[in-house]
Amino acid sequence: MDATPHIQPDAESPYVIDVSGLTKRFGDRVVVNNLSMRVRRGEIFGFLGPNGSGKTTFIRMLCGLLAADAGSGTCLGWDIRTQAERIKPHVGYMSQRFSLYEDLTVRENLDFTARLYGLKNRAGLVAERIVHMGLTRFENNLAGSLSGGWKQRLALAACTLHSPSLLLLDEPTAGVDPGARRDFWDEVHKLAAGGVTALISTHYMDEAERCHRLAYIAYGDLLAQDTVEGLVKNSGLVTWSVSGGDLHALSEALKVRPGVDQVVAFGNTLHVSGENEAAIVAALAACAGGRERRRIETSLEEVFIHLMREARQS
């Protein structure tokens, strides 16, 4: 392990991640294709895409767990291809699956993690993390006995125990209840306010909206990256809401109309989206009858469904 784990080159650089043309193949299959990305210090960067899109592979290349087949770049100022061992001590990695020891207690898991990193004052650091993450009443419980939300807190406590500069969180809230997810994101924002950078993959649109910037990857290709507002604005989509009776029949009628790309039910309304507003207005005039309709803001979910469909067709 690096003897000076908290001293990084290019400390004044605004970019914690700066990569260009990253490519990874498994046999004949290209999993990550010519991906370029920059992430600023203290930024929460959301990484979205369908299963099998290459998100996890990209994250693993960043922290040196996988070698890129092509491309170059730096993570925390170090070369991801030649200096991976210098990157790892500065990164906190949290996988989708709980990866700590279920037959150890909360305290024993954190103490073991502190030993791995060679941290001084282990007992004090572990005690502080237990209190900070609200784990005090569970500290002597086996990790395997915790609920999903408390396992998530323990995993986050473990991956931040060594005060990393970069968090790589791979779908960390999958299967966790909404309250626990909100608590998790509040903690990530506190860390970001202290200068920690976070790259987080997620399938939840409400979580994506809590990121400073987002990237969408599908089938190995980076399709778009921007703020939430930028992605919505640049999508070119227009969305109308329509409410009234027999929405199922209306939905089926609208789906076959030219210019209508998406028709999605939201409770007692339908959201109708497409790139051609005149075509949507004409479709609603023809099919919606006297139902109430109005133009609304396009949602992030509608943008990503649109991007995914475009990727499939290309």
Image (spheres, rainbow, N blue to C red):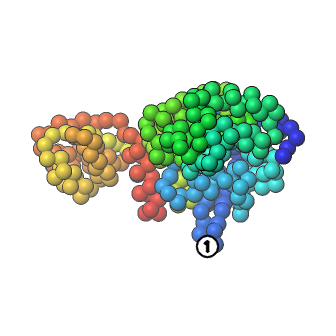
Horizontally, residue 194 falls left or right of residue 255, namely: right
The residue under the point 72% across, 38% down is 111
- Displayed quadrant of residue 28: bottom right
- Displayed quadrant of residue 121: top right
The residue lying toward the viewer, choosing from 271 and 115, is 115
136 above or below 154?
A: above
Horizontally, residue 132 falls left or right of residue 48, namely: right
The residue under the point 43% across, 37% down is 178
The residue lying toward the viewer, choosing from 201 and 286, is 201
Q: Amino acid at mark 1?
A: Asp
- Determine the residue located farthest toward the bottom in the rendered image: 28
The residue lying toward the viewer, choosing from 292 and 196, is 196
- Displayed quadrant of residue 190: top right
Residue 97, horizontal then vertical, whole percent: 56, 51
The residue under the point 32% across, 51% down is 262
Residue carrying label 1: 28
Q: How many marks?
A: 1
The residue under the point 73% across, 53% down is 64
